[in-house]
Image (cartoon, coloured by chain):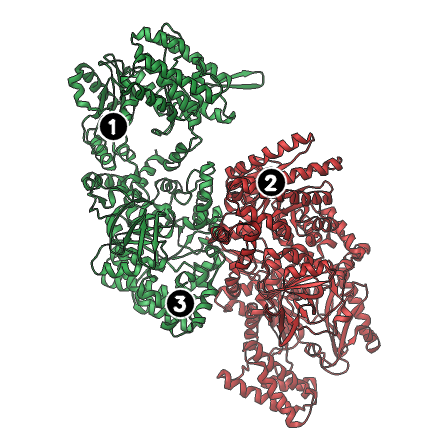
Chain colours: A green, B red
Amino acid sequence: MKSKIKIKDGGLKIMKEKFVYDFKEGNANMRELLGGKGANLAEMTNMGLPVPQGFTITTAACTKYYEDGENISENIISEIEEHLKNLENISGKKFGSPENPLLVSVRSGARASMPGMMDTILNLGLNEEVVVGFSKKTQNERFALDSYRRFIQMFSDVVMELPKKEFEDIIDKKKKEKGVKGDTDLTAEDLKDIILKFKEYYKKNKGEEFPNSPKQQLIEAVKAVFRSWNNERAIYYRRMNDIPSSWGTAVNVQMMVFGNMGNTSGTGVAFTRNAATGENKLFGEFLMNAQGEDVVAGIRTPQPISQLEQTMPQVYEQFLDICKKLEDHYKDMQDMEFTIEEGKLFMLQTRNGKRTPAAALKIACDLVQEGKIDKKKALLSIEPRSLDALLHPQFDAKILKSKTKIATGLAASPGAACGKIVFTAKDAILKAKNGEKVILVRLETSPEDIEGMDLAQGILTVRGGMTSHAAVVARGMGKCCVCGCGEIEINEKENTMKIKDEIFKQGDYISIDGSTGNVYGEAIPTVDAVISGHFETIMNWADEFKRLEIRTNADTPKDAEVAVKFGAKGVGLCRTEHMFFEADRIKAMREMILSKTKEQREKALKKLLPIQQKDFEGIFEALKGMPVTIRLLDPPLHEFVPKEEAEQKELAKELGVSLEDVKNTVKSLHEFNPMMGHRGCRLCVTYPEIAVMQSTAIISAAINVLKKHSDWDICPEIMIPLVGDIKELQYVKSVIVNCADELIKNANIKLKYKIGTMIEIPRAALTADEIAKDAEFFSFGTNDLTQMTFGFSRDDAGKFLEDYYSRSIYEQDPFARLDKNGVFKLIKMAVELGRKTRPNLKVGICGEHGGDPSSISLCEEAKLNYVSCSPFRVPIARLAAAQAAILINK
Amino acid sequence: MKSKIKIKDGGLKIMKEKFVYDFKEGNANMRELLGGKGANLAEMTNMGLPVPQGFTITTAACTKYYEDGENISENIISEIEEHLKNLENISGKKFGSPENPLLVSVRSGARASMPGMMDTILNLGLNEEVVVGFSKKTQNERFALDSYRRFIQMFSDVVMELPKKEFEDIIDKKKKEKGVKGDTDLTAEDLKDIILKFKEYYKKNKGEEFPNSPKQQLIEAVKAVFRSWNNERAIYYRRMNDIPSSWGTAVNVQMMVFGNMGNTSGTGVAFTRNAATGENKLFGEFLMNAQGEDVVAGIRTPQPISQLEQTMPQVYEQFLDICKKLEDHYKDMQDMEFTIEEGKLFMLQTRNGKRTPAAALKIACDLVQEGKIDKKKALLSIEPRSLDALLHPQFDAKILKSKTKIATGLAASPGAACGKIVFTAKDAILKAKNGEKVILVRLETSPEDIEGMDLAQGILTVRGGMTSHAAVVARGMGKCCVCGCGEIEINEKENTMKIKDEIFKQGDYISIDGSTGNVYGEAIPTVDAVISGHFETIMNWADEFKRLEIRTNADTPKDAEVAVKFGAKGVGLCRTEHMFFEADRIKAMREMILSKTKEQREKALKKLLPIQQKDFEGIFEALKGMPVTIRLLDPPLHEFVPKEEAEQKELAKELGVSLEDVKNTVKSLHEFNPMMGHRGCRLCVTYPEIAVMQSTAIISAAINVLKKHSDWDICPEIMIPLVGDIKELQYVKSVIVNCADELIKNANIKLKYKIGTMIEIPRAALTADEIAKDAEFFSFGTNDLTQMTFGFSRDDAGKFLEDYYSRSIYEQDPFARLDKNGVFKLIKMAVELGRKTRPNLKVGICGEHGGDPSSISLCEEAKLNYVSCSPFRVPIARLAAAQAAILINK
């Protein structure tokens, strides 16, 4: 995109880059270089629409500004001056001239829209002399002085970083002095005095006069906009929206037009379609005799756009015409800013309008029906992540309006929930089984809480981040969860909690919103989200274009059913250990762990066998012959034993062993780095009898279901976790095969099954050619693979990742987005090596990344066979997979 | 090596492999296929030496035996029968014939010598009928019956796995019954009765008759030898000696000759040179009228080989001649077995003789001087690891002879030490500073013990394995250490320890041997090892041929000096944190950690600065301008804070803060997986002031030393640990550069310095091309890289690795030997990627693998610039590097 001019000079090549473009030199395709706003201003200019002219300083200039140690180079300055001259010629006005002054606005404009994140300076070009001429020229001294006052204020705040409040105080003081209320009640004389005081304050604090040279003002303003690319809120916004810091922002310098020049002037914002519902009807607001900032300030109430027809019929007509032209041109709903200066309409901005997820679906379907776009473009116009909001219950919006939140935590898992407070998983189970709706409030959750979490309406924790146990499990369940709400103090003894001096008892109602993190101290009714026909249409179109198969991570028949309803075509990961945490099962599990001999262990495992088998039967039934991948026991055994003495005592009593025995076992299971400890297939190597029990449960379940449904194509995929070496896999595989083949032989039935492995240890990826000799499928466990590849654990990284974000070392959470340069390199390598050995190797991904659109796009790139995600992410994955297929095969 | 015959049959290729070789068909170069013993028997046969003839079943047959599910295929059996027929022709005897019976021995013989690890069966071919014929033929009924008795015993034990003891009991019972003492006192009739009882016992226990068919005996014996490849002691031996389980063993079937046929028969073992001293003089023993097993049993005392000259002068002459021929032929000291049957000499085996390290050096130098081999071959003849024994103090061998060990632990760090018992690092320091020699006895050591460990003569721990803190640190220091000696019970209250009911008080003398793991309950004087001139000669030759530079890991000036004495050409890793654990320093470190503001932290760091700087000056002085790589602070901060409440109280008092404060800090530093936590460069990102302090200390030290020695080429290499992303490196680098450049400018001196990184996180290796943009050198931290690549931590893997070894899933400890298929693949990738970006990138290795010969060979393969190891491993590394260069560039 960069336009470079090569000048050959002997053997030496000098590249001269162009850093400034007049609006008429650009077009909509140049948004990388000109930013979104600049590119669209150029496009509108070339469409012949009424745009106040100007020029754009490119994003490349911003990058260079940072490369040069936050300095604008001389050649860029002279390019700016050159284009300023062009602008003077176009406008017939002169920058800094008291006679016929050219005033400009200086605005940011990045490649992606970052509304309100960066800086803007209006009315630039005014000084002591120019304001006098401007006042004569406009024949409106008060207007001219007010413009100057606004400029000084903005420049001091934005460019010179003086506190905004001091300036407002000066105005307030003057208003008090004069006994008036509104800014508009101040006279020209008042404004002159205010300007004087502004300048005094400026000099006192900056140690120098307020800059009088318009050119100096301009360069300083440009620098300020460049600087604002790296202000805190911009960094945060970029991280949230996946915008690389390397992009930089462009700067648009545009001739000022004034909506505040009287009653034939005005300003407004409009959308070509309704952004909330998607209805095909112009939608917007305007305010007469006002500048953009007045609309934002909300002092006067704007009028609906339709009123403009009455107020200025010709302008309205012209505007309608422009709206139609823009939508036809961009083939998408447009969000536009306009200003009317003394009866003349100017377009200040157009862009594809932001919209609600429901509106996005409707607009996409409508545009296809109107013949404006094809299905591919429709699919690409919808942000997959936004669908999430359509899949969970929400608070009744009308009722919510009148409610005030009492605390805020992290929006850990979307949806809204309302219920009675309970403080333990046990109470949650008790009450829920009684038919009561409860919210489980915990300091933090642990695997033992799993059943209580499942039966609660929502989960609220005091500690823990977006990747804490509560957050991860809740998202997996599609259950509303607010995490890390530090304002809550739980009093365990009294079964109460305190938020800002208010005490809540067990049984009191609260409501939580996992999409915002808000907590409400009362009952707010929720409504189930309605999935309109447009949603289904879009999903069907997505299925037409996607290549990747979408599976789900489901540990129970219930989860599996939900996912199938959302369009999952198989189970990519069934975690068998989650089955062991429920009340009746954990006991047998603990008995197994406390066993001292293989015989004792086998006895305990025998108790678990029928439970596991029943779960598997339920999942096979729910999937109706679609593939199911079941992972053998993965977590270290210490996760299953109680840490508290009271519970240890209880367990000792139950099992008829000494407390000492229990304590010794717990102690012997302690690990320094449990993430890198005795888990996954390592458990099966030590205790092959566990693998035998699990294989028996899987194969027996498959046999039973197949006997009932002989037409189903049941083929269990048994997945061995944490393999790092082919020999580990071979050993565990031999244990499984011996067991499975005997069961199948004895049942006298034809049942196929596959044995494969998780690729979640870097060494497995590095030796994937070896591993594929014995693995019939790979599934990337990207959670662990990310941990090992980066060398930090999710549980601990929270402590230092904030420092990394604030220094722009990382821009994204590698546990949320697949790391393209590191982890994905391993994945690609493993896929290539694996398929070299076994060309038809089935490869999928089952980490949390499987539900993340940007990661799904990488999965498409690596030609995986499927992605697997939590049930509520299945529709998102379907759309993301379609987008990836369309974009990559374009 | 495998000889394959291709028979074209239409489009189909049938490959027929040859699995059995007559001795005359082989030669010494075929040891991969024939095993060491088989290849040498073949070679001797072809040299015309008197070898009892026979044939070798190849290692490939062993591999096939395992592939076929522990079965010998029909075609191998018929090959064996064919070669048995050849042997009958050569010998003129007949297998299983009562008239002129052919008896054979069946012996294992792997590619590498594994003495005593696998099975042997002698006198095979005897049965009820044959023994009668054999007795007639030899005219010695008692001899024939004794041979048969021995065969039944061996076959039942080795092949049929019946307990040896039961057979010995039958003999003992008979001896008692007859009132005789020696086996030789039993008559033919007695032996007949014994044979009867043997067979009865056999039938009772195996449920069938003892096999009477010689062919069946032979096949079963061959299978037993194959099986013995995977017996427990063979697996263990292979792991210790780096022998892959995939090699398999060959089986040698050889005509029996008898050294026990009377007074003109005998058997013996000899070395062409002295295996203990290397002296060029025949050395060995023989026993007349005996079989090999009698020599081993030690009932009669053998005579020195020189006595043979008197006993059988002609045979002696012939033997001397053969010895000379063999040494000239193999160009190395030979270890030979021979048998004299009725005055006729037979050679049963020859191989390169095992020797002591000192002998190895002398023999290598002598052989070069004698013109028998060149320097390359001399260097290749010495096992680098064996040099270790020459570098540490040893017990006075004469005194040690009379002493009995009281306990045994793991031989964690070689050398011998003697001193008074102390139980705490504090006491060690106190007494050592008083001039007393102490042995530090601890349950386990922690980083806080470091100074006490350094001042003690040796370290003895109750818990912990070969990679425990004590073991790792002691090896680094070159200090004697015995670990995991579970027989010790420490009584902390009374300052005593108990070993097998004996109580030792603080101040009592003990002695420990880190090369054997033995503990002695008294003082045993040690002697410093003498490094003879041969050692120096070999080291100089090694330096001629090696390409890799050898550096050392040294944290103190003292360590650095030792290493330079041993030939180190630089410091590859100086761990700065070890400097912080000493008593006067840990306090300031803790103050830094407990700081709440940057200012407080900087104040505490200021106290550490002069200490660090002085250490660095010492190291720069010791290195005299050779390169020094210094790593910034690496471990997580919680390693520096006290865990016990008493110590926490003390600290709170010292620093004038509340105990609560200390506790809160300790709690906040807790990590779930500290190995994957807030450490390495992550600390510098959070607290850049730490990097500033350390850079200041390094650069200031370099400036000071350079001022004193302006001719030294001082160029500190500052190493940033745990980098996973180029931006981390860039951030920390910018902090260092800002600080360093200002110091250099202010000092008005020319000082170069380099900034590089550890590659110890898989992601760093994967993105090495990026990282090399900013890193001027790489150093592979293979300890961490191995942990992350395998996904298990050293501290936890101990629990399950034993299961892995016993199931042959792993054959080696990946923390001791660089993992060729996984970790090394990452290393090679990183070197290639890094040099693509920066062709002159300096690359080294500084993990513990840097001192391991097999890993050094991989470093040569990957064309690293240097390896860095602990001071006492430098000579080993020099030799290993030379060997690698010679072998790879061959």
Q: Nearer the viewer, residue B61 or A385?
A: A385
- Tell whether A722 sits left or right of A150: right
Q: Which mark is residue B693?
A: 2
Pointer 2 and pointer 3: residues touching (CB < 8 Å)?
no
Please say if B450 is above or below A597: above
The quadrant of the rendering that contains the C terminus of chain A is top left
Give the labeled residue for mark 3. Answer: A648
Q: Chain of mark 1?
A: A
Instruction: Give the CA distance from mark 3 to mark 1.
Output: 63 Å
Determine crowd level at label 1: few under 14, some 14-19, many 20+ residues with C-alpha closer than 10 A: many
The percent coordinates of residue B125 (x first, y second) are 60, 79
Give the labeled residue for mark 1. Answer: A333
Q: Nearer the viewer, residue A702 or B599?
A: B599
Residue furthest to the top: A99
Identify the amino acid type marked 3: Gln
Specify whether residue A226 is in view: yes
Please say if A407 is above or below B408: above
| Label 3 and label 1 in one chain | yes
SS at circle 1: loop
Instruction: Give the CA distance from mark 2 to mark 1.
Output: 57 Å
Name the residue at 40% across, 24% down.
A157
